[in-house]
Image (spheres, rainbow, N blue to C red):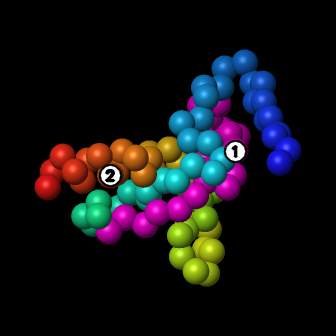
């Protein structure tokens, strides 16, 4: 398998919180146990703000539906599992 390294070189951009292939949960107003999950398949730096990353997420649905989210809309699946264990 070939490893591809992608480097973002903007001098003021912060490192993205999530990376390609990472499993995330999409935050919503319902109980966190019901949040949809998916995998990061793309990311881009917002044109208007150097430190706003937008993530393309393919949902874990058979249809493979995808949508773009900001960092505030997402939670790492590991964080989601840990918070569910703490509040049981």
> Which badge, 2 or 1, is on the more N-terminal residue?
1
Q: Residue at x 14, y 55 (%)?
A: 88
Circle 1 is placed at which residue position? 44
**Up-down: is 15 above or below 63?**
above
Q: Which mark is residue 32?
A: none
Label 1 CA crowd tier, 10 Å (few <14, some 14–19, many 20+): some
Q: Residue at x 60, y 26 (%)?
A: 14
Q: Residue at x 40, y 47 (%)?
A: 78
**Up-down: is 11 above or below 77?**
above
Residue 58 locus on image (x, y percent): 61, 65
The one nearer the camera, 48 or 7, is 7
Q: Secondary structure at mark 1?
A: strand
Q: Residue furthest left?
A: 88
Q: How many marks?
A: 2
Left or right side of 63 for 3: right
Q: Residue furthest right?
A: 2
76 magenta-colored:
no
Left or right side of 78 for 86: left
Q: Which mark is residue 81?
A: 2
Label 2 CA crowd tier, 10 Å (few <14, some 14–19, many 20+): few
Front: mark 2 or 1: 2
Q: Secondary structure at mark 2?
A: helix
Residue 82 locus on image (x, y percent): 29, 46
**Up-down: is 24 above or below 38?**
above
Q: Residue at x 72, y 18 (%)?
A: 11
Residue 77 locus on image (x, y percent): 42, 51
Q: Which residues are magenta?
A: 34-55
Q: Residue furthest bottom?
A: 63
Can the viewer see residue 80? yes
Quadrant position of residue 61: bottom right
Can the viewer see residue 29? no
Mark 2 → mark 1, Cα distance in angstroms: 27 Å
């Amino acid at each position: 398998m070939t490893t591809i390294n992608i480097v973002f070189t903007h001098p003021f951009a912060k490192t993205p919180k999530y990376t390609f292939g990472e499993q995330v949960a999409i935050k919503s107003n319902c109980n966190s146990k019901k949040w949809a999950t998916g995998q990061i398949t793309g990311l881009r730096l917002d044109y208007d703000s150097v430190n706003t990353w937008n993530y393309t997420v393919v949902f874990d649905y058979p249809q493979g539906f995808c949508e773009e989210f900001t960092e505030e809309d997402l939670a790492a699946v590991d964080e989601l599992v840990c918070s569910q264990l703490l509040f049981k």
